[in-house]
Image: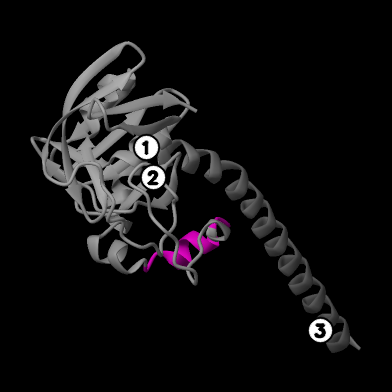
Amino acid sequence: MKNKLLKYGIFIIVLFFAFQSVVNIASADDHYKGDYYPKYEKSDKNNYFEKFDKHDHDEDDDDYKWKGEYEREGNYKNFQQNTVQPSYWNVWTRDTNITISNNLPVEEAKKVPFKLNRKTETLLVLPSNGQLLVSGEKMAKLFGIKSKYYEQSRILELSNGKEELIVRAGTNTAYENMIKTPMPAKAFSYEKTVYLPLSVIANAFGYSVEWDETNETFVLQQF
């Protein structure tokens, strides 16, 4: 009888400690959830370029190996991998599988006037893979938006307060409002800045681009 009571007492004690352990784990988990994510959100913005360096390699961009990452973000519906889309020098389609445009208004590197409202600036235009590349910083100045160039990492950050565009030389990927988006041609570093497709920087900040053949001028207008 005494042995039965002893075994029963030990069983009750074991159950008590097991219950306490579960309660402690659940409590710790609730504390983890409530405390960790706000800190992560605060630090994530500060480490943005570190994340960019870690995940954005040239070879990845060439083969679009980041398809899985983009699909997980729920944005893969914007991509049409199985259909070849036409590309345009003045329209950013944001497609990955595109043809190369052969109908460019400027076929060699030269300085060309850009007209925006009553303001005209002459900028260097560089044809590349069916696109026209321009200086991101000089276009930003024309648009009246902020630009910051990180020389060591060759990253150009552009923002007007509402829209943001981040481009890295040597890749054909842009971060448009924090969303990884393909560009129709690679950006590259030249004259201590980043040159990127005209269609990308213009459309990203709400401008259309047309070619005035008579005056040999690019005309920019807000959408």
**Disc 2, SS:** strand
Q: Earlier in the sequence, mark 2 or mark 1?
A: 1
Q: Which mark is residue 165?
A: 1
Callout 3: few (<14), some (14-19), or many (20+) C-alpha neighbours within 10 Å? few
Residue 47 shows up from this direction: no
Q: 15 and 198: which one is in front?
A: 198
- How far apart marks 2 and 1 lie (CA) works out to 6 Å
Q: Are marks 2 and 1 in contact (CB under 8 Å)?
A: yes
Evaluate if marks 1 and 3 touch, with contact meaning CB atoms under 8 Å apart: no
Name the residue that disc number 2 marks.
175
User: Which is more N-terminal, label 2 or label 3?
Assistant: 3
| Residue nearest the viewer, comparing 44 with 156 | 156
Q: Earlier in the sequence, mark 1 or mark 3?
A: 3
| Residue numbers of the magenta segment | 65-75
Amino acid found under the numbered disc labelled 3 = Lys
Secondary structure category for the residue under label 3? helix
CA distance for labels 1 and 3:
70 Å
Q: What type is the residue that disc 1 sits on?
A: Leu
Residue holding disc 3: 7
Q: Quadrant of the N terminus?
A: bottom right
Q: Secondary structure at mark 1?
A: strand
Magenta span includes 122: no
